[in-house]
Image (cartoon, rainbow, N blue to C red):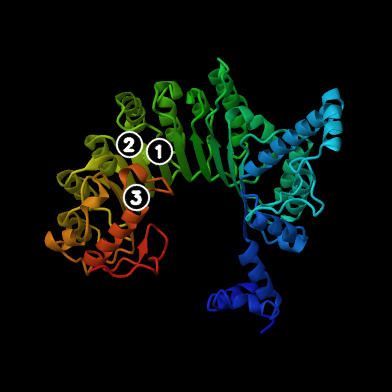
Amino acid sequence: MQDLPPDTWALVARYIPPLTLPKLMSVNRAFFNLVLDTRYGVVEWGTLDTKLTQLLERLQEPLIASHVRRLHIRPWFIQYLFEREALFQRSSLMQEQERQTWSYTFGQIVNYFYPTELNSTPNDGPPPRPPGFITYPPTNELMSSMINALKGMTNVTECEFQWRDMPINAQTLSFLSSARAAFNSNLSKLVLHTRVSRFDQILTFADFRQLTELELHFEYDPSTERDIGVINEDILIQSVAPFINRLQDTLHTLTIASVARCDHSTFLRALGPFPNLRTLTLQMQFNDTKYLRDPSSLGNLLLRHKAFLTTLAIRPNYDEGFAKALAAWQAVSDACTADLSYFSNLESLTFPALDLPTMMSLIRYAPAHLNTLCLFGRFLTFDELASVIGVLGSRADLRTLSLDIDILSSEMFSLLANTFPTLHSLTIVLGTPLNLYNPRVFGDEGYACQTDWQLYDLAIYHRYYKDDLNSPSADMEQNLMWHVASHVLPNVKSFKGTGSKLPRWQKLE
């Protein structure tokens, strides 16, 4: 049995309880590696605590570090340590200067002849530390540990790095170069969070030629420079676009999320073509025309890739309720839907449809093999939903559906169940308050139990908290999903894509 390939042992391990598998590390090398892959496969550096320092200690061993596959670096604490160190240095300098003054000398003389309990130093050492007090390691020591750990991570395939406001110095440059050298051969996915104005600083780190997935998140720049828009636009065209275009032979997934203060039109026109691009996600500022002065640049980008794309997601950052924002997005929407052949090869589409005609046109011309559809931006009444479902009904391959609904109703669930008997996942974003729904509602208003509908996953969100992981309505959403599963959709086995229901939930009467 020792001659079995690792893949076979991996299948065997699936039937072993997770808490038991570590006890079998000594059985063979396959189990040994499986346990280390599980324990160290995903590493996150985001909080300076005892857990992180213990993890860094273990990652000093190259054998352990080589099992890291996904690394998420959110090094806000590194900047904190640099700032703390600078503060201590200034404080020490001020104390040294004070010691050299006559007032310091005079004070020492007074304290010698007239000691007080306040100024006396106890002989039994420093005062006790309060519970939970953490002794942070010196900045140099921490950085050296992280750099040494990076050197052993030669099998990382995915890296997320949030550059934020980290200073550029010898240590951070060594940090970046170590990551670049270690990840050079195997890294396939890179996620970067930075300001456009700081992109050049990490360009040498990010210049991986074999990437297949790239996510760029350009954050808001608080700079007070008058020409910050011109500066950002120039960097996007001169640095960012060439960087992305160098990946034209390998890139198949591209995500650009930007709240940068500049016009993105020329940048979008400078991208591509990418003959292997299959997934494109754009989440950009459209709440003012100054962020995309030429909406046709987005349509042109879609035109150049319509023969390749199978997944398209466009999510504008607009402030709901402001006419200016909605009007700005409508101009972009019109540019995207001017030629509906852009969507002819798609298998998955996420698109804001603020008006019913746009929504109906998108659905009507969407390909028959579409399996995932997410339309948002308009909360549908039941009559509007019936019109949308009537057009969608001819797509038997549809497996995932997400819609904004004004209010839940028995008729809505019946319509969906009868039209999409093979639907796998349903997401509903509600426009009405969640507290309108309680167990009595589902019993008193005649909600029919859809026992024949084999829907697997259900997600319900309140309109204001769809993308908020710490939503104040999260508990209400969970309770509502449980009520729906208990009274209407008994075959649902997963909530919000988790693959399961929380075991603490009990059936609600």
Q: Which residue is mark 3?
A: 473
Residue 120: x, y in percent? 79, 43
The amino acid sitting under disc 1 is Arg
Q: Which residue is mark 1?
A: 315
Q: Quick one: 96 or 417, which is closer to the camera?
A: 96
Name the residue: 54% across, 37% down: 217
The amino acid sitting under disc 3 is Ser
Q: Which residue is mark 2?
A: 340
Q: Quick one: 441 or 188, which is closer to the camera?
A: 441
Instruction: Name the residue furthest bottom.
Output: 1
Q: Is residue 440 visible?
A: yes
Residue 248: x, y in percent? 58, 39
The amino acid sitting under disc 2 is Leu
Residue 3: x, y in percent? 69, 81
Sort mark 2 into few (<14), some (14-19) or many (20+) by Cα contacts within 10 Å: some
Secondary structure under tag 2 reads helix
Q: Quick one: 390 or 354, which is closer to the camera?
A: 354
In terms of sequence position, does the residue under pointer 3 or pointer 2 come before the other? 2
Secondary structure under tag 3 reads loop
Secondary structure under tag 1 reads loop
Q: Is residue 444 left or right of residue 468?
A: left
Q: CA distance from mark 3 to mark 1?
A: 22 Å
Quadrant in the picture for residue 332: top left
